[in-house]
Amino acid sequence: MVPRLMASREAEKRRRREEREAAEQAIADAAARKKRLGVVIGGVLAVAAVAAVIVGVITLAGGGDDQGGDQARGSGSAADVPIPAREVTDLEDAAKAAGCVLKDPPNEGATHTDAKVTYKSSPPTSGDHNPSAAADGIYDAGNEPAIESLVHSLEHGRINYQYRPGTPKRRVSQLETLFNEKEGYHQLVFRNSTRMPFAVAATAWDHVVACETFDDQVFDALRAFRDRYTDKGPEFVP
């Protein structure tokens, strides 16, 4: 009976050892799964954190020195409404043909201010302005930046195309087509808010071409003005 008893004890030991090893393996497997889950969750959280940082950077960039608080639509954002092909390239000749006037209003200063500014010329071409410049782009009526930010954009060498309230939608769309021409850049399109006595105008720092009638001929005048004065402000900002 002794050998049989010893065999029984050995079998019991072996069974217990196997159960212990199985339990230890189960614990190890559980720990490994937990570790893998932690890595996955950590990766997801890291991606979320990076995304939050990117959004924050973009948001901060929108409030910087070269960005106004209003949202502009970019190039190619609207279906192009055709405008006449260019015929006149000389600014003076193009303005005369369109019945537009070229003016160089007296400079009104360039101090940064958070206050509301009353400008002597309409549309203004210089003067005290908001520290934040309006961003390049096309602004829907009612969403145009403050005039003080638009004047700051002129200081940076931008061309501001502006139209009188009540301008037909087709003409506004044609200004967007002009904006989208490959020859143009550093431009803004918006509805005028200074009660200018013109149907359409383009301004640069200390310069303006203004047209009492918005017809097909004005586009050559606006193009020639753009050619002459883009990036000619006292502060060049790419």
Image (cartoon, rainbow, N blue to C red):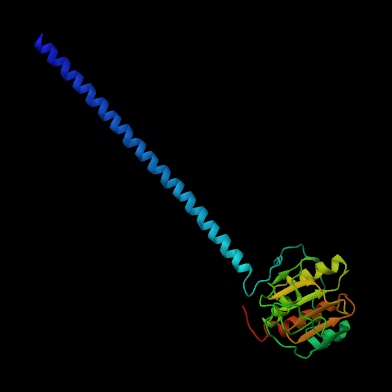
Q: Where 79 falls versus 93 (above or below)?
A: above
Residue 233 image offset from top left, x and y in percent: 68, 85
Residue drawn where x is 78% and y is 91% of the image: 106
Q: Nearer the viewer, residue 203 or 222?
A: 203
Q: Give the quadrant of the C terminus.
A: bottom right
Image quarter of residue 54: bottom right
In this image, 68 relative to 141: left or right? Answer: left
Q: Which of the 4 image quadrants contains residue 118?
A: bottom right
At 41% from the left and 47% from the top, the residue drawn is 39
Quick one: 213 or 113, which is closer to the camera? 113
Q: Is residue 42 left or right of residue 115?
A: left
Q: Determine the image quadrant of residue 7.
A: top left
User: Where is residue 140 shown, x and y percent of the image?
Assistant: 78, 65
Any part of residue 130 in sight: yes
Please identify the quadrant where the N terminus is shown: top left
Q: Position of residue 131 (x, y in %)?
A: 66, 78
